[in-house]
Amino acid sequence: MAESVPVSTHRRRRRRAVAGAGALALALVAGTAGCSSGKSGGSGGAGSAGKTTITVAGMPATTAPKTRQQFLDAVAAFEKANPNIKLKPTDTQWDARTFAARLAGGNAETVLTVPLTEPPGLIARKQIIDLSTEVKGLPHSADLDPRALAPATAADGKVYGLPITEYALGLVYNRDLFTKAGLDPDRPPATWDEVRAAAKKISATGATGYTQMTVKNTGGWILTAMTYAYGGSMEKKVGDKYAPSLLDGPAENALRQLAAMRWQDDSMGNNHLRTQQDAERDFAAGKIGMMISTVNSYNRYITQYSGKPADFGMAALPQQNPGRSTLLGGMMAVVSAKATPAQRSAAVKWIDYFYLKPSYDPAAAEELALAQAADKLAVGLPTLPFYSVAVSDPVNTAINKHANIPAANFAPYVNGVGKLDYQVEPPVAAQELYGALDTVVQAVLTRKDADPREELTKATDRLGPAFEKAQAP
Amino acid sequence: MSTGTRGVMSEAERRRPLTRIGLGTTQFLLIAALVIEGAGPIYWVFKGSISSTQESLRHPLALWPEDARWSNISTAWTSLDLGRYLMNTVVLVGGSWFVQLFVAVTGAYALSVLRPFYGKYVYAAVLATLFLPGTVSMVSLYLTIQDLPPTGTSIANTPMAVWLPAGAHAFNVLLMKQFFDGIPKELLEAARLDGAGPWRVLTRIVLPMSRPILAVVSLLAVMNAWKDFLWPMIAITDSDKQPLAVALPRLADTSDQSLLIAGMLITIIPPVVVFLVFQRQIVRGIAFTGLK
Amino acid sequence: MSTPTIPREAPPVVAPAPAGKRALTANRLRGGSRHLVPALFLLPTVLVFGLFSWWPIVRSLLLSFQQTNLVEPATWVGFQNYRTLLDDPLLAKAVWNTVVFTGLALLIGFPLPLFLAVLMSELRRGGALMRVLVYLPVAVPPVVAVLMWKWFYDPDTGLFNEVLGTVGLGPYPWLQSADTAMTSLVVEATWAGAGGAVLIYLAALASVPTELYEAAELDGASIRRRLWHVTLPHMRSILLIMMLLQVINTFQVFTEPFVLTDGGPEDSTVTVLLLIYRYAFVSGDYGSAAALSVSLAAVLAVLSAIYLRLTRTWGTK
């Protein structure tokens, strides 16, 4: 049974406040909508006869023909329902490295789909635009889970993006290797001490017990998840500015655990320059017992790396006292800062129609699930619902009719993740922070005498200028 | 002075029995070492591309796979979409070659034969770029292809983004101009007196005489364009428009080893064949230009 | 000293232009088009160099004093980008790594081709075969070479540890340790680049005048002394040029660390160009990337100037 991630109770407290604000905003948006369509003859994407043209990223590649067709059908249906809006879909993948320049050259799409790591930086550099007003005018906006919006919510409460898919990071493990090592695949490690013990047993069979990604900023990303699981944080507010909080203890404890696994148990293999891709490939090939990864890595596991579905196991992120948190991952839709007001409102309409509707409208959800199943993509993955239970339960029921994943293998994840808090990426200079932490993780894994505290101190010193620059007035 | 008829050792020394044995042994060892060093890795790629991943891992030193899988190469071709990347590469290399040759020939011809009064300033400005390797203006070149003056259009993500900057290769202009400078002036003058226009002088006299330098510049242009990695990676961001050299590192992280090695083999073959066929010209070109 | 030259073909016989056209063309040349035609021929050069060489250089300079998110107009920030660089502890590391790479490449990659070339020139047989073999690695595209070596260096299944293991050595960490990663990169780069240098040295060795060796022989100089006192002095200028060229190239090393180690482990292979790439394309800080580019350019310009000066004096000698 692939139930969606249960929503913990504390979100209910916020709901009322959001609902109130939503009702107020609805009234406001009713006024501005007419206003903006009147202005659509202005600059940018306005075509002839008052038509607003926007480009939208996120079209699936030709390698997934069914979901691509489903995307194109949705574009056509949307244009029919909104005769004033013309959509130009692109299948350009998000690429942080080229985005700014494409934006400057006027080549960036109006609607962009970005990983959760990106919105804080994009907001700080003023490259995406505030959507608060438009969002409040959307159907069921009162039921939107603030946690789902959090990754693109600025410190002042403005909303810059809407969720496409979100999930909590967890422990991915090979059930077959667990069995071979004499471990129970239905009882995966729940603490990091259990991870260490399991890794030791798995490595005795010749496979790598546990693997940590270390390069291209993934080292920092995964260490951040671990630090949350150890009850810590990566950044803290000091006065009115954020500063790195690497030396609080939890990050150091996480690193000491890794060092013990690496140097005392030798259960982490020999390759310590790992990208996410090569770790996932080797995991699918049955060479790796455990690693921290995302729910939708399962899609790549079956489509790209031809892994065996039965061997894929997933558990909630193991915790170490006093931790009870995990890191949120996924994709969001954001709107380019170059968008005119008319384009902005058209963009949000499209995001609602294509990305949000399948999360609140059971019929749309089922249609999407069918297309994904036909493309042999995973259906029924335990992702974070964007709406309150009343809205999302019927949707999940509709999706699960077509679920094609080994649901029992995800049960440990589903059961465990509900007890955890979801934390977002570090809000300031996340990529610089992750880069500096890559170095720290590499040091601990490649040099026996590396001292975690000393390495974290070096990283903190190195981050000083980046934090200053990112928060300059 | 005579050169090249002998090396450090004299004929008398070569005839000494000990030296002869020493030379023979050295010869054998050196060729063996060079075979391992030069041909070995390429053979390893060949062998790896027709072995299963498991076999490559189990018997890395075997000379021939127990179970040769020629189908690996066609599987790699289709599943890694290598045909597309190869085509992209050919398009990028062909265009870069043409632009380089076109710019070098027209520019050198104007500077060497037509000699406008401002020519020496243009030439100086071209040569000045020799001081600054392209990689150091990579970032601003990237911004430039995004909003090309004067209209601000973007050629990023199109073959143009690789072709046109390839033309700004001062060394080609220098080589070409030096060669054109050596063409006897009387010949050009005679043609001009016969009423041949500048275009005719170029196509009927200068170019036919310049075949050797055209060959050298062409070969260097093609080899360099085939090898280029950093700039195409920056300039072409769409994965299905990228050349092999840019696609391979990305595929390396995600593909099965034997398929990746088959992809490497396909990338190696064209430049190696070009080298083996044109080795005399290339060797001469290298010695001539003093460049790798 | 004779430089190897390219043989020229005999000039083809020029077919006389048709009589009718002749006067016309001559007229056109004498008229206003006397300035127009050269300008037309120079146009591609000026356009291509202007847009893709001169303007980016000027733009780098400007950009290094600006801050831009590429959406709003750029703002002038004076030397702030340069200060950002100096504040970044990674800069010193990157500069040091680049210098180490260059130094190691000289240490390993400089004498080896010379040694090979001398050996090859003394051996009478198999010259063509040896030249092909020695140059083959250069024909392999660098990215493939790097990926190949990635498999050779693999800590679990790599060829090197496998081979060394059969004689009881290792396993060595190669790329997996800050102590050995840089050397491993240099070994790969040397393999990939040495062939070109060997061919150039071979050409230079062939140009040593026979008389010099004979004179030295009459003086009773041993083979070693002849190498030291005749061959090497004769090659001094080409050796110097090759050294500079190698330094200029290795200062811009990028593909090896980018593909093999991404600058790791522990930043031990972060090079200056990799840092520029990260500033621009990972952090979106184009200003600092430009400032570092300009600084690298200044160093390279000095080296290139020396190189060009040497080639000129060498060429005219």
Image (spheres, coloured by chain):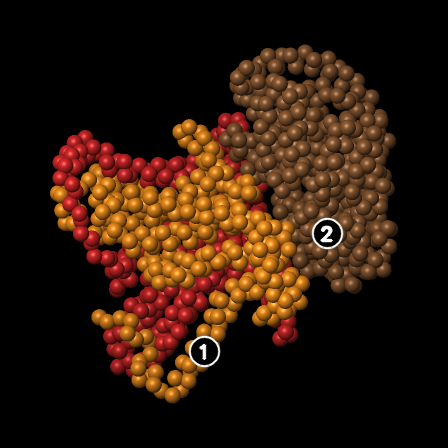
Chain colours: A brown, B orange, C red
Q: Which chain does the numbered disc 2 sit on? A: A
Q: Depth-wise, is mark 2 or mark 1 nearer the camera?
A: 2
Percent across and percent down for residue C271 are: 53, 51
Asked if B7 appears above or below A163 in the picture, the reply is: below
Identity, as a three-letter code, of the amino acid under mark 2: Gly
How crowded pointer 2 is (Cα within 10 Å; few <14, some 14-19, many 20+) is rated as many
Which residue ends up furthest to the bottom in the rendered image?
B17
Tag 2, which secondary structure? loop
User: Horizontal placement of B106 versus B66: left or right?
Assistant: left
Q: Residue at x 82, y 47 (%)?
A: A409
**Taking C71 as reference, is C6 above or below it?**
below
Q: Residue tagged by mark 2?
A: A307
* Parent chain of label 1: B
Three-letter code for the amino acid on which mark 1 is drawn: Phe
Left or right: residue A326 versus residue C68 is right
Mark 1 burial class by Cα count in 10 Å: few <14, some 14-19, many 20+: few
**Above/below status of C285 relative to C182:** above
Q: Position of residue C192 (x, y in %)?
A: 48, 60
Circle 1 is placed at which residue position? B28
* The N terminus of chain B, quarter of image: bottom left
Do pointers 2 and 1 mark residues of a single chain?
A: no
The residue drawn where x is 67% and y is 36% is A67
Q: Nearer the viewer, residue C201 or C76?
A: C201
Q: Is the C-beta separation of discs 2 and 1 under 8 Å? A: no
Residue A83 picture location, percent across and down: 62, 18
